[in-house]
Image: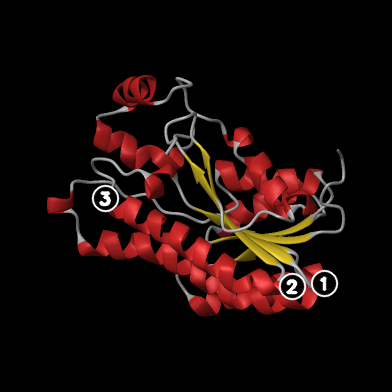
Amino acid sequence: MAGRLSGKRIIITGAIGNIGKEAARGFIAEGARVVIGDIAEEAGRAVASELGEAAHFVQVDVTSEASVANLIARGVEWLGGLDALAQNAGLQRSGAIDGFEQANWDALFAVNARAHFFGAKHAIPHLQRSGKGSIINMSSLAGKRGGPGLVAYSASKGAVIAFTTALALELAPDNIRVNAICPGWVDTAFNQPAIDFMGGADAQQKKIASLVPLGRQASATEIAPLFVYLASDESAYVTAQSFGIDGGVYNG
């Protein structure tokens, strides 16, 4: 059904990567206006230009509360309000725990976990004014099921799942829904650190063939429709959920 997001006003972070860009494209295709935030200004403006007049770029460093507050404030000003916040910005670092540096651990939690707190904190008053809303957090299969070399990354993504559940219960009286998306292997450069840790692309493909029941990676276009669904009124009774899109890996 076309126009599923007609009139919706959405802010999305991490919008220059494969998944974020496709999510933003999906929002706009269904009638939304979208503010995209990313730390990479030149690439972000290029994505906004590519997406057309329904998109607007605001530079943001999600590790800074002041920067996130600025994104929300400027985004709401351009949009005229807020109906959904999609927190897609993320960071990948891999390595065995005995040699893992604290700086990398802290960076993972700053981008993958703490940034969700900043975004929600500053978006919630605007969603409350709208009378309802949706917060979509990006977690990962790793947040449900970790693996060698992914201890720190898994911990940061697991924090997002716990945050999502608790926040959804807190905001339910305001009719603000909070859900998480948990992709498995997706064909994107974001996963390169994990691929390197595994020993390269050939080793990755062997791992995927043995681990993923569907036998392949997802494309970003297979993740984006869930963003659209969770931002739409079709998911009005859906909250506190962590949705796996992982080819059948996690079935617990």
Question: Which disc number belongs to residue 151?
Answer: 3
> Residue 213 appears in which quarter of the rendering?
top left
Q: Secondary structure at mark 2?
A: helix
Query: Does residue 236 appear left or right of residue 195 in this picture?
Result: right
> Residue 110 appears in which quarter of the rendering?
bottom left
Question: Which disc number belongs to residue 16?
Answer: none
What residue is at 48 percent from the left and 34 percent from the top? 246
Residue 69 locus on image (x, y percent): 59, 77
Give the spatial CA distance, label 3 vs label 2.
Answer: 36 Å
Mark 3 or 1: the one toward you: 3
Query: Does residue 31 appear left or right of residue 162 in this picture?
Result: right
Give the spatial CA distance, label 1 vs label 2.
Answer: 5 Å
- Who comes first in sequence, dot 3 or dot 1? 1
Mark 2, Cα crowd under 10 Å, few <14 / some 14-19 / many 20+, is some
Amino acid at circle 2: Val
Residue 219 in the image: above or below residue 143: above
Q: Secondary structure at mark 1?
A: loop
- Which residue position holds label 1? 80
- Which residue position holds label 2? 76
What residue is at 60 percent from the left and 39 percent from the top? 223
Mark 3 or 2: the one toward you: 3
